[in-house]
Amino acid sequence: MKTNVYSIDGKTLRQMDLPAVFESQKREDLVKRAVLSEESELYQPKGNYRLAGLETSARYRGRKEDFGTVKNKGIPHLPHEVLPKGQLGKVKRVPHAVKGRRAHPPKPQKIIVERMNKKEHLLALASALSFTADKETVCKRAHTAIGTSFPIVMDASFERLSKAKDVQKVLDALDLSKMLEKAKKNGTKSALIVVSSKGMKKAAENLPGVDVVSAADLSVRHLAPGTHPGRLTLFSENAIPEIAKRFSI
């Protein structure tokens, strides 16, 4: 599979051969499963204080004839606060009482991460990459027509840009500025930039909806936000070999 290599001026410089991973089978089901699995790893375990609702003077007298019982007083047989002179206060401790304990609080031992087989996850990543090379899918997701070849590969000088205005000029030259305007208006994701290092991150992080990720850290959730594959992705020429290494056995 071949694609064009573009300069930072938006001009076609040459063609290059792409790794076979960009021609992988397109599996939306695998992509969705991988995104949910990756996002579940970002969840923070929840738990409660083990004595929550129990640190009170309230006590329960179970025997009807016990001293200080509430029998024949029109008071519910529930744990009451102990007040001076033998008086009974508010009901505490039980779940249906004000500031009482929770009946079924969240438990930190609960498994909230959805594990995925490593080989299956690698197939999902390959499938997500192949969607970025499908012009019909990318244009449909972007809701606009894009005139470049897919996937979009930029010359190595692209990832050496250090200012946001320079990255903006590149996107304008490729006629991709409409996506930034839409992302700024709706607060959605726009383009993804994949580079061989992390040096370009500060240059593009202020552009609406644009994310920058290195080829080594590229994951399925970057390529398919919201489990929907086909995100418009710009690959640095140096990032392509780094991606191919991840699929070499």
Image (cartoon, grey):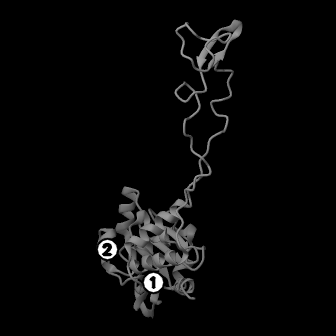
For the point 62% across and 41% down, the residue is 48
Q: Earlier in the sequence, mark 2 or mark 1?
A: 2
- Return the x and y of residue 122 as percentages of the image width and height: 51, 78
User: Given the image, on which type of amino acid does mark 2 rest?
Assistant: Cys
| x 41%, y 62%: residue | 226
SS for dot 2:
helix
- Choose between 21 and 106: the one closer to the eye: 106
Q: Residue 223 location, x and y as percent?
A: 45, 71
Sort mark 2 into few (<14), some (14-19) or many (20+) by Cα contacts within 10 Å. some
Q: Which residue is mark 1?
A: 153
Where residue 76 sits, quadrant-wise, is top right
Which one is in front, 56 or 194?
56
- Vertical comparison of 120 with 238: above or below: above
**As drawn, is 151 to the left or to the right of 44?**
left
- Decide if residue 177 is on the left or right side of residue 248: left
Type of amino acid at the residue the image marks with label 1 = Val
Say which mark, if any, is on residue 169: none
Q: Position of residue 89 (x, y in %)?
A: 62, 14
* Residue 187 image point, x, y percent: 41, 57
